[in-house]
Image (cartoon, rainbow, N blue to C red):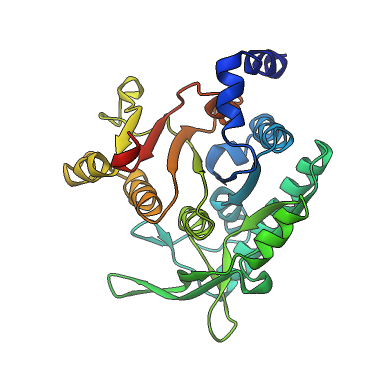
Amino acid sequence: MEIESLINQAMKPEELQFIKEYQNKIVVVKYGGSAMTDENIKKNVVEDLALLKKAGLKPIVVHGGGKEINKWLSRLGIENKFVNGLRVTDEPTLEIAEMALSKLNKELVQLMESFGVKSVGISGKDAGTIKVSKRYSDETDLGYVGKINNVDNSLIMMLLEKDITPIICPIGLDENYQGYNINADEAACAVATCLKAEKLVFLTDIEGVCKDPKDSSTVIPKLSVHEAKQFLNSGGAGGGMLPKLMNCIEAVENGVSRVHIIDGRVQHSLLKEFLNKKMGTMILAKGNI
């Protein structure tokens, strides 16, 4: 099996030392996209998370579920509406989104448990973990879409201290205890920033940040924050990469040691990244390069 080969490779002194650098360190993994809809890839991702946990790391998972939400909206004949990449979320859509995210959340818990890792699924609602306010896009009312104001890490830290892996879905509460849908990338960045995570990894549907978005061979392996901003200003980041890269920059500027954007469709890409296999694109503060 490929996973056995990877574990054997990890016993090489230089690679074993690399993964040891993360022992007892908090790492946040944002999990979404096609990697959540393909059952084989989902199993590989969860297996990687379990191996990282057993290697002494403290992983936290923040997951999306856009494709699952789309599926349920389509089944119920509810139109999908987006403004600047954000889902317009009326009350029925919020109810469906929360249902779909909760379903995925417990599926991930079940898989983690099957690999021998104690896990608890929570949303940003639990213990007031993620507090939000109503979000607008160019003054357009998006409905129940939240802008993150604060992350309370007390519940997350309690779980980590009890050797339990938190799996978080992006639903938050406002000051009136109304639930709001949250962009999962933003939730992952906010959680990682609050906890000053050693590493934040985005599992995506692309190979990384590419000089030419149409050519996967042009992946940029490493960017400083300054270089990442220059890349944004040049117009090189389009589509979904634009907000993702902006989130990455903000996370590094606010205390996350490093952020990686890697292709979650590649088998065991998460484990390979922690074995220093140079997956995707790494974003660091200038002083760390």
| Vertical relation: 109 (above or below) 209 | below
Q: Residue at x 64, y 31 (%)?
A: 41
| Vertical relation: 11 (above or below) 96 | above
Residue 267 is situated, as x and y percent measured from the top left of the image, at 60, 24
Q: Nearer the viewer, residue 175 or 87?
A: 175
Residue 157 is situated, as x and y percent measured from the top left of the image, at 66, 60
Q: Nearer the viewer, residue 20 or 35?
A: 20
Q: Nearer the viewer, residue 114 or 164?
A: 164
Q: Is residue 22 left or right of residue 229?
A: right
Tally of numbered tags: 0
Q: Nearer the viewer, residue 41 or 155?
A: 155
Q: Is residue 25 left or right of residue 242?
A: right
Furthest residue to the bottom? 176
Furthest residue to the left? 234
- Residue 54, quarter of picture: top right
Q: Is residue 231 left or right of residue 122?
A: left
Residue 109 is situated, as x and y percent measured from the top left of the image, at 76, 48
Residue 8 is situated, as x and y percent measured from the top left of the image, at 69, 13
Quarter of the picture holding the C terminus: top left
Q: Residue at x 83, y 38 (%)?
A: 116
Quarter of the picture holding the N terminus: top right
Q: Is residue 131 left or right of residue 282?
A: right
| Vertical relation: 241 (above or below) 221 | below
Q: Residue at x 51, y 24 (%)?
A: 276
